[in-house]
Amino acid sequence: MSDPVAAVRESIRQILQTQHAGWRDIVTGLSADALNWKPGDETNSIAVLISHALDAERFLLATSVDAEIDRDRDAKFQVNASSAGELLALIDQTESDGNGYLDALTAERLGQEITRTTRSHTGSWWLLHSIEHSCEHLGQAALTKQMWEQRQT
């Protein structure tokens, strides 16, 4: 691919699709009890981890192309999922939204300083942070699922 921005766009898209597949694998087949279970008082459920991570992903991708979106970060830590289907739909919607932001990615945006609240970084930083942040919570959710499954045996 001769266009470096297109190469970045497609690489990010592929990485996020892989992460979304990981989220789908975690939630598929889990009951509402499993999705909302917390291993301890200061921990988060799988539903909260997914809700927060995907909300942050959407925000970070939008920010990387200097698009402003409405966001209630705190509400994502209060989520209770009624089913795996609810979270699977959220993953699908986030992937669709993210593809739209990636389609708007330009070389100018990658190098542009973009400020949100008290943080200012280049578009490329916001873009890369979207992957880093989601990956961290994907690992936490996988561990939470393992802990749930171990306590069921």
Image (cartoon, rainbow, N blue to C red):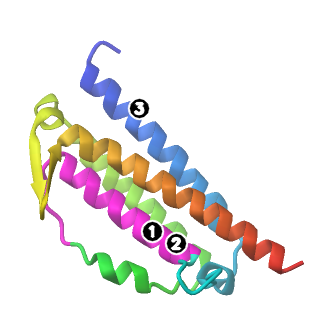
The amino acid type found where label 1 is placed reads Leu
Name the element at disc 2: helix
- Tell me the quarter of the picture where residue 109 sits: top left
Residue hosting label 1: 90
Residue hosting label 2: 87
Please tell me which of labels 2 and 3 falls first in the chain: 3
| Residue 72: mark | none
Mark pair 2, 3: CA separation: 25 Å
Q: Based on the picture, tell me whether residue 104 belongs to the magenta stretch.
A: no
Could you tell me what secondary structure mostly forms the magenta stretch?
Answer: helix
Which is nearer the eye, 131 or 5? 131
Which is nearer the eye, 147 or 75? 147
Residue hosting label 3: 11
Name the element at disc 3: helix
- The label nearer to you, 3 versus 1, is 3
The stretch in magenta equals 46-70
Query: Where is residue 73 shown, x and y percent of the image?
Result: 30, 75
Q: Are marks 2 and 1 in contact (CB under 8 Å)?
A: yes
The amino acid type found where label 3 is placed reads Ser
The residue drawn where x is 57% and y is 87% is 41
Q: Is residue 60 left or right of residue 146?
A: left
